[in-house]
Image (cartoon, helix red, strand yellow):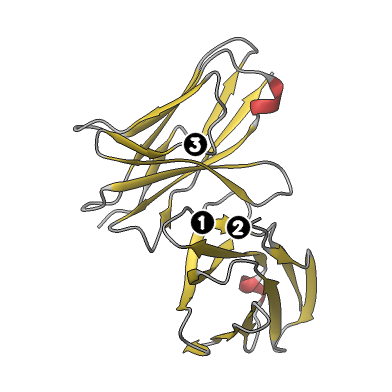
Amino acid sequence: NAGVMQNPRHLVRRRGQEARLRCSPMKGHSHVYWYRQLPEEGLKFMVYLQKENIIDESGMPKERFSAEFPKEGPSILRIQQVVRGDSAAYFCASSPSSDEQYFGPGTRLTVT
Amino acid sequence: GEDVEQSLFLSVREGDSSVINCTYTDSSSTYLYWYKQEPGAGLQLLTYIFSNMDMKQDQRLTVLLNKKDKHLSLRIADTQTGDSAIYFCAEKPGNTPLVFGKGTRLSVIA
């Protein structure tokens, strides 16, 4: 059973461009969470999704950020018009229920 | 509010025991977790404890939970250089997302 997959592992974008981060949960997991980790910080929750539904987006910035988890395919975290402050590691976690969460390797976004 | 506190650094000699401490705020937390993050990697779930337990042991890892003081600790016996990493404590208050501490950076000196 493959673990949580994220791609790309590293992403460089210029200010104003769009960033798309993908997450494929573990097989059989229908819960997906996105977290952001700034340098020297812990992880901060962004959004919690189940298939085709956003359950909790209380940690997501109101503008420029969106997330989806379609019926088929990976979950996508989309950041429009990126700014330098968006540079961080973005981690996805999946869970078979709402308890244990298993994390992917992360996508490190650098905005130049 | 939700706030998980950890000391930022811990340094131990190889072969000694490491104890990483954490305090949390929400007494309704049903599960408390320890994750390990190695440089450039994601978080690895090490262990977790249900809130009605006082202790959980898993090979070299021992988790102690003091619910009265909202204090959680992770003890690593016979610490090895491969244990050098950042260790995150996390709580799960009710049906809400995980709340993480800022992590404790463990350095193991050979």
Q: Which residue bears the numbered disc 2?
A: B100
Quadrant in the picture for the N terminus of chain A: bottom left
Q: What is the distance, in whole Å, between disc 3 and disc 2 at their CAs?
A: 22 Å
Q: What is the distance, in whole Å, between disc 3 and disc 1 at their CAs?
A: 23 Å
Instruction: Kindly identify the amino acid type of the residue bearing the numbered disc 3.
Output: Arg
Give residue A38's quadrant in the image. Answer: top right
Instruction: Determine if residue B59 is in view.
Output: no
The secondary structure type at the circle numbered 2 is: strand
Q: Where B54 sits versus B109, above or below?
A: below
Is residue A99 or residue A86 the one in the foreground? A99
Task: Looking at this view, name the residue that lies furthest to the top.
Answer: A16
Instruction: Kindly identify the amino acid type of the residue bearing the numbered disc 1.
Output: Leu
Mark number, residue B98: 1
Q: What is the distance, in whole Å, between disc 2 and disc 1 at their CAs?
A: 6 Å
Which chain is home to disc 3? Answer: A
Label 2 Cα neighbours within 10 Å, binned few <14 / some 14-19 / many ≥20: many
Which chain is home to disc 1? Answer: B
| Image coords of residue B101 (percent x, y) | 66, 60
From the viewer's perspective, is the residue at label 3 or at label 2 nearer? 2
The residue located at (72%, 83%) in the rendering is: B14
Q: Are marks 3 and 2 on the same chain?
A: no
Q: Which residue bears the numbered disc 3?
A: A9
Give residue B69's quadrant in the image. Answer: bottom right
Q: Where B1 sits versus A19, above or below?
A: below
| Image coords of residue A77 (percent x, y) | 44, 29
Instruction: Kindly identify the amino acid type of the residue bearing the numbered disc 2.
Output: Phe
Q: Is residue A71 left or right of residue A95?
A: left
CB-based contact (under 8 Å), mark 2 and mark 1: yes
The secondary structure type at the circle numbered 1 is: loop
